[in-house]
Image (cartoon, grey):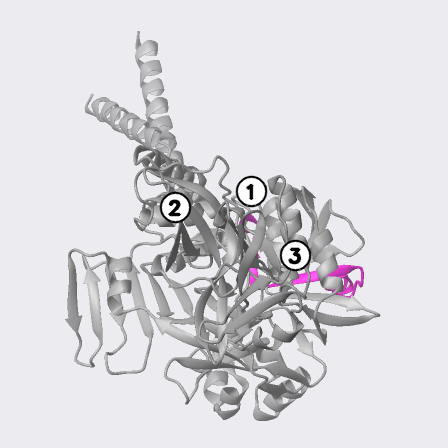
């Protein structure tokens, strides 16, 4: 009898302990299952997705490679053709194909550099790293491995491509079905513009350095912009919105204390808006961050015709317009949309200016020196090559004096260093000691 | 005994918590994306059906591509008058239109196919029609006695009254023709992706541009005038949607900006 009672006691203890352990396990499972969270995020987006306008286009329009490179007689060129847009052609091919397997084949720097120098491959690059899950169909939704470079054989192999990550030198062999790059190869072969370049290792990857002095075209656009009310209606809705003007003259619209939109000062020439949405965030993966930022880009309702994924770092993802293969910088060095994530809010800083009507090219050009000369100039000023994250030729938006809404896009070098994009002229005027001071303590901590 | 009671209480509470957590895990979160998008599309389709709007059997959901194009404004036709040796031609500078009547009778007869072959032969002869080879027959804009051709380019066809050739037939002979010519087109910017034809029709419907009891006859990509800037006409790709009113049988051509899905308000009606 006593034995039976003791046995029941033990059993009760065991079952209770089991129930407690099980509840802990289940709780941990729920808390750590990012797929679940990302699905909840997406579910949230899906209901919000009803708000998306008809102007919204696919993910493939926002996240596409922006540069193409290829070898001709041993020389590496940046390939560009406005009639047969190579990036766009690749994006079309990408939408048709299906990835069947991804295999890591190398992660050494020497192998990576050998691949960069392999003349049998066309190379297409994204401005920054994206994840496999948003790269093409057939990849796992959980695949957060990053890539920024695609190698396509020039010899006609449509069954596999190679994909690389400049930062960690990883090369993956990607087997594909329904891939056909025949047209892309043909377009690359006959590309209208071929600019000689070489790849140089910078802090975040391999950057194309222009090896010769080049003439770059200055394009012009007629611009327009939406009224404040358009963005208020899109981002906050039409009911329950309150307005508040701060002492400094900023007007902010808010909804339920959780969502806020700061509009440009009425008498200023600024077109900069700041949207903030307060909510607890769990951005566990790069993919969920990227997808969420895309959702917010769509939500704003800007014209997305030329808008492309441009740059991503630990807290922000940036989008900007690309015109004839170069990124557009507004107000000296700003991009069109910057989404910033923190644990308790998402903020989206955007500029409402829209490059609406392209004006026929009138022959105006500007001459840019080889990239290495520019880098040497920066070095002499105190910005060492090792501090440069990236250097690109971008188009600076400059207002035309002849007409109010006419802008010229003037190509100039832009450099990302210490996490900031600035034109070379701006860096040259910048006192760099403050930057070095902020960066050095971190370095010493890291060491 | 108390200890045992507490243990039982713990067991019950934690079992309830376990059940709740399992239910939470099994309860599948609402799923996003394709299914939602396609169901939205399906519901719009059924709404359209309920409004008596008929759509073509195959309306693509694939994106296409296009360019911003520019044409320099100039009198392209007046200088060609002297080379038109087989027609009596006059040119109106105010509306940039050339009207011509064949000097000799040009007989047009036979089946539709034969008629078209004859007309193509006529217009492709530069002594009859300047730039004639650049024009392509457009059935939906033509009637039984008038045949309309649109100006083509290496980027696509231009649908504009300033880029059109209309040949009028009377008593099985070519009576006359009117011609307008925009000029040679060049791409202003690089090739870009456009929305799909279905996307364009959906945008028209949500913008109340598709009346009830109408039939979408055809959706095709063509270039339309956007604006004039610095002496050039800017063209952009548009989805051309031909809509027939089921009651009156009137056909209206509506244009949707293929880059932004906005309506372009230059509708043309054909009877």
Q: Do marks 3 and 1 both belong to one polypeptide chain? A: no
Separation of disc 3 and disc 1 at Cα?
60 Å
Q: Is residue A115 left or right of residue A20?
A: right
Q: Is residue B65 magenta?
A: no
Q: Depth check: give the residue in front, B99 or A36.
A: B99
Q: Is residue B194 left or right of residue A253?
A: right
Q: Chain of mark 2?
A: B
How crowded pointer 1 is (Cα within 10 Å; few <14, some 14-19, many 20+) is rated as few
Which corner quadrant holds the N terminus of chain A?
top left
Q: Give the percent coordinates (x, y) of residue B227.
A: 43, 71
Sequence-wise, the earlier of marks 3 and 2 is 3
Q: Depth check: give the residue in front, B246 or B241.
A: B246
How crowded pointer 3 is (Cα within 10 Å; few <14, some 14-19, many 20+) is rated as some
Q: Give the percent coordinates (x, y) of residue B189.
A: 56, 70
- Residue under label 2, please give it: B202
- Residue under label 3, please give it: B122
Numbered disc 2: secondary structure: helix
Q: Chain of mark 1?
A: A
- Residue depth check, mark 3 versus mark 2: number of the one nearer the observer: 3
Q: Give the percent coordinates (x, y) of residue A229.
A: 24, 65
- Residue depth check, mark 2 versus mark 1: number of the one nearer the observer: 2
Q: Do marks 2 and 1 both belong to one polypeptide chain? A: no
Q: Quadrant of residue A344?
A: bottom left
Numbered disc 3: secondary structure: helix
Q: Is residue B49 left or right of residue B158?
A: left
- Residue under label 1, please give it: A140
From this viewpoint, is residue B196 visible?
A: no
The residue range painted magenta reads A109-134
């Amino acid at each position: 009898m006593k034995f039976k009672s003791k046995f029941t006691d033990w059993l009760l203890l065991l079952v209770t302990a089991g129930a407690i352990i099980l509840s802990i396990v289940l709780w941990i499972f729920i808390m750590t299952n990012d797929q679940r969270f990302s699905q909840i995020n997406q579910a949230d987006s899906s209901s919000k997705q009803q708000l998306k306008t008809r102007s919204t286009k696919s993910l493939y329009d926002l996240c596409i490679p922006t540069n193409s490179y290829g070898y001709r007689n041993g020389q590496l060129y940046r390939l560009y053709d406005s009639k047969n847009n190579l990036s766009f052609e690749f994006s079309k091919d990408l939408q048709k194909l299906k990835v069947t397997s991804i295999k890591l084949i190398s992660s050494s720097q020497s192998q990576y550099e050998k691949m960069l120098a392999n003349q049998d491959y066309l190379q297409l690059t994204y401005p920054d790293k994206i994840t496999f899950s948003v790269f093409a169909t057939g990849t796992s939704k959980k695949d957060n491995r990053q890539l920024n470079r695609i190698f396509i054989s020039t010899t006609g192999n449509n069954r596999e491509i190679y994909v690389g990550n400049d930062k960690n030198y990883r090369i993956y062999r990607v087997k594909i079905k329904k891939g056909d790059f025949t047209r892309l190869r043909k377009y690359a072969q006959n590309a209208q513009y071929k600019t000689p370049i070489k790849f140089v290792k910078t802090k975040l990857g391999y950057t194309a350095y222009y090896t010769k002095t080049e003439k770059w075209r200055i394009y012009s656009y007629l611009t327009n912009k939406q009224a404040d009310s358009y963005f208020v209606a899109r981002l906050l809705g039409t009911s329950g919105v309150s307005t508040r003007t701060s002492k400094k003259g900023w007007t902010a619209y808010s909804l339920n204390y959780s969502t806020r939109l700061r509009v440009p000062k009425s008498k200023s020439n600024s077109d900069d808006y700041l949207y903030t949405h307060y909510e607890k965030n769990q951005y566990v993966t790069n993919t969920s961050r990227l997808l969420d930022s895309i959702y917010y880009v769509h939500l704003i309702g800007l014209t997305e015709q030329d808008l492309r994924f441009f740059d991503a770092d630990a807290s922000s993802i940036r989008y900007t317009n690309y015109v004839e293969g170069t990124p557009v910088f507004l107000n000296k060095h700003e991009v069109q949309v910057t989404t910033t994530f923190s644990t308790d809010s998402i903020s989206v800083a955007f500029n409402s200016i829209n490059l609406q009507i392209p004006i026929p090219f009138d022959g105006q050009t500007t001459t840019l020196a080889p990239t290495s000369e520019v880098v040497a100039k920066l070095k002499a000023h105190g910005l060492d090559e090792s501090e440069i994250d990236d250097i690109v030729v971008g188009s600076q938006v400059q207002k035309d004096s002849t007409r109010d809404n006419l802008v010229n896009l003037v190509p100039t070098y832009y450099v990302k260093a210490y996490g900031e994009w600035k034109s070379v002229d701006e860096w040259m005027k910048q006192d760099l000691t403050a930057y070095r001071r902020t960066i050095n303590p971190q370095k010493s901590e890291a060491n | 005994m108390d200890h045992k009671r507490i243990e039982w209480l713990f067991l019950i509470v934690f079992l309830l918590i376990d059940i709740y957590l399992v239910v939470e895990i099994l309860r599948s979160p609402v799923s996003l994306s394709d299914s939602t998008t396609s169901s939205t599309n399906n519901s719009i389709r059924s709404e359209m059906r309920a409004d008596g709007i008929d759509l073509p059997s195959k309306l693509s959901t694939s994106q296409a591509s296009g360019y911003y194009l520019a044409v320099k404004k100039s009198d392209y036709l007046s200088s060609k008058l002297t080379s038109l040796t087989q027609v009596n031609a006059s040119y109106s500078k105010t509306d940039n239109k050339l009207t011509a009547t064949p000097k000799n009778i040009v007989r047009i007869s036979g089946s539709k196919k034969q008629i078209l072959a004859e007309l193509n032969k006529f217009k492709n002869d530069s002594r009859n029609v300047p730039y004639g080879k650049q024009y392509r027959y457009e059935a939906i804009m033509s009637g039984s006695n008038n045949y309309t051709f649109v100006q083509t380019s290496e980027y696509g066809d231009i649908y504009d009254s300033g880029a059109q050739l209309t040949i009028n037939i009377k008593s099985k002979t070519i009576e006359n023709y009117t011609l307008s010519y925009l000029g040679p087109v060049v791409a202003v910017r690089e090739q870009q992706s456009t929305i799909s034809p279905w996307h364009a029709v959906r945008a028209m419907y949500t913008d109340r541009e598709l009346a009830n009891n109408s039939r979408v006859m055809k959706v095709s990509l063509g270039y339309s005038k956007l604006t004039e800037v610095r002496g050039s006409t800017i063209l952009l790709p548009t989805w051309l949607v031909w809509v027939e009113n089921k009651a009156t049988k009137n056909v209206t051509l509506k244009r949707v900006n293929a880059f932004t899905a906005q309506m372009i308000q230059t509708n043309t009606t054909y009877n």
